[in-house]
Image (tube, rainbow, N blue to C red):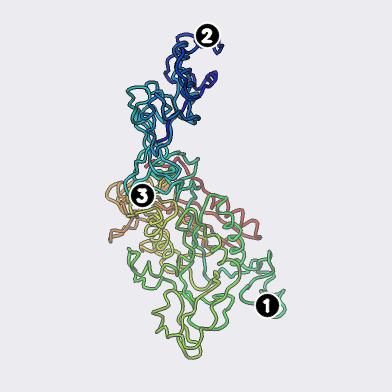
Amino acid sequence: MAPLSAERAAPREPSASRSPSAIGAPAPARPCYSSAAHILPPPRTPALSPTRLLLTSALLLLAACETPLVVSPDVSPDAGSDVDTAALDVADGGVPLVACDPAFGSLACLGDQRCEATARVCVDCVFDMARCNADGEREICPKPNATAPGQLSGGFWQPDPCATLDVCNPASGACETPICTPGVQSCKGAVHTHVCNEAGTAYVGEVPCSSGKACYEGECQRVRQNVLVVFDTSSSMHTPLDPASFPPECETSAINCLDDFPVCDGPPGEPRTLFSLSKRAFAEVLAQSKDLGVQYALQRFPQVELTTYGAGNCHTGWYKHVGTMTGDAGEHDTSKASWFGKNLGEAIFVPFPRRASLSNAAELQRWLDFQETRDPVPAPGTPSCSGGIQCGLNACVVVDGQEVCVLHDNPELRAAGQTPLGKSLFYAGEYFRRFVLVDGKPCGVSSDCESTGYVCVEGACRDPFRHCRDNFVVLFTDGGESDFQSEADFFNPAVQAKRLAFGLGCATTADCRGGASCVQGICLGPNQTVQNVPGTVDLDGHGALSRPDGSEVSIRTSVVNLAAGDGGGVFPQNARIALAGGGQTVPVTVTDLASLETALKKLLQVDPKCKPEEF
């Protein structure tokens, strides 16, 4: 135990932040003068040691001034001192204590210590406190219990560790159970962020996302509209832009007017066919998709990998037109686990990105860059693909007498075959409701939703902007329906466009979609009558689309009627598709790249209509 020593100390003016009144210490009864004339001389006593003499003088000064002198442990008293210091040596670890004068507050105390008025000792706290030390361990400081000068318990920091699974929260000094990673920002609901505190025990700093943004994966990200472009990949898209000069300007034959495979076009910036012009225009517009507040998915008429190995050609490349997706037997309903989900890539060749933080821009460009390559010939000894079972969407081809899977490592959009508009709209609608509009799908975290714009709320996928935006299909074509031309057929394009937007037959208005009304058993949208839209009713019960939670799906269909000459005779048919689908008809008679880009931007740019929902 280290003994207490006393030393005269000149009084100091208390600062404004540590004045006696600020800590509740009593003010002196009268001023204490340092002049020797005001200090009574000590009575004659036997010879004293220097230290005993110093203490005695201090006691006389206290009696004369009624203001205790500050005492510090710089000089130790003799062993024979009659000042009992045992009660002062109580700090944990046996650290010597500092005596203090409550009249001067905490001027004699070090750091954040305060003068305890009864014990006249500098203490760490004057009421119950708790804190986390530099090592993150919890400490407590019990309120001092003093009975006399130099005698007290408590008042000093001591360890009080948390339970094994808990941590000390620096903000409160309390032991709490961690719930998050310290410093990591996350989403609070659909349109706010907050940050995990330094202890990992609570979230703080709630910040709302700005207009047009929602919170995904801890960040406020711009909500982009969904536009699925159905790209006409029929053979007629190879129509020359200038029939009058094509092919006479070519040296020998029409094929010489184009570069060799895989480019199959004129010089850059000088497209020669409707197809190459369209690809170049779309590449330019899609490159600006984020700036336009839109994200795109691309769909073609169904194609599969060519099952022969060798040089591709300028029409089909290394693809084969198949008309309908593999396994399609004409059902009016699909599932992700059926032929539809397994073979979706035959039609939806670039899907929407699964998360808002991702972009499919690079993949979009790969299909429109006029470059196409397939994997090199597999090494000898590659196991047989047994007729394609192991190849998935890739081709099982015969190379040197052996069946092997061959995969495109640089794909390209190619055109061949007929114009199945109706089936393509059916595939588009099924893609939206099975993979894109997933409200109510079970989830643990937002990434489980696997669809842009969705957040996981209480175990279910929700889109905070679902009432704000329309989902669009843009049918980009130069021709008319080749397979289902009667509007009595479920797969007619006008019937499918109406099904996607408003629904077909109905018993009440509740059976319809997109604000349509039930009139004479038919769902009719704005500007529609029973005479100008199909009256087809689906007896299989799939005349309208719904999300997993049962809420309605409405997808508007617009048509870009593309022509190199006068627009052709298919415009009335395609305009009827757009009318039935609640969209627009945009006739584009193209003569150059700029005119087509302007038309596409005007049609494809859409904006959210309202504020997001709060969950």
Query: 240 or 290, which is in the foreground?
Result: 290
Q: Is residue 255 left or right of residue 381?
A: right
Quadrant placement of the N terminus: top left
CA gap between label 2 and label 3 equals: 100 Å
Q: Which residue appears at 50% of the width and 51% of the height?
A: 584
Q: Which residue is mark 1?
A: 256
Task: Return the disc, 3 or 1, that comes first in the chain's sequence.
Answer: 1
Other-residue count near label 1 (Cα within 10 Å), few / some / many at <14 / 14–19 / ≥20: some
Report crowding for label 3: few under 14, some 14 to 19, many 20 or more residues within 10 A (C-alpha): many
Asked whether disc 2 touches disc 3, contact meaning CB atoms under 8 Å apart, the reply is no
Mark 2 crowdedness (10 Å alpha carbons): few <14, some 14-19, many ≥20: few
Tell me the distance, in whole angstroms, between the alpha carbons under discs 2 and 1.
Answer: 121 Å
Decide: is 200 above or below 374: above
Nearer mark to the viewer, of 2 and 3: 2
In the rendered structure, which disc, 2 or 1, sits on the residue that comes first in sequence? Answer: 2
Q: Is residue 414 visible?
A: no
Depth check: give the residue in front, 603 or 306: 306
Does residue 460 show up? Answer: yes
Q: Position of residue 73 (x, y in %)?
A: 47, 29
In the rendered view, tell whether residue 550 sits above or below residue 247.
above
Q: Report, in whole angstroms, how far the alpha carbon at label 3 lies from the one at label 1.
A: 52 Å
Amino acid type assigned to the residue bearing label 2 in the image: His
At numbered mark 3, what does the secondary structure look like: helix, strand or loop?
loop
Q: Quadrant of the C terminus?
A: top left
In the picture of the structure, the residue carrying the numbered disc 2 is 38
Residue 513 is marked as 3
Amino acid identity at mark 1: Asn
Name which quarter of the figure residue 595 lies in: bottom right
Which of the numbered marks, if any, corresponds to residue 548? none
In this image, 166 relative to 10: left or right? left
Counting from the top left corner in percent of width and height, residue 26 is at 42, 15
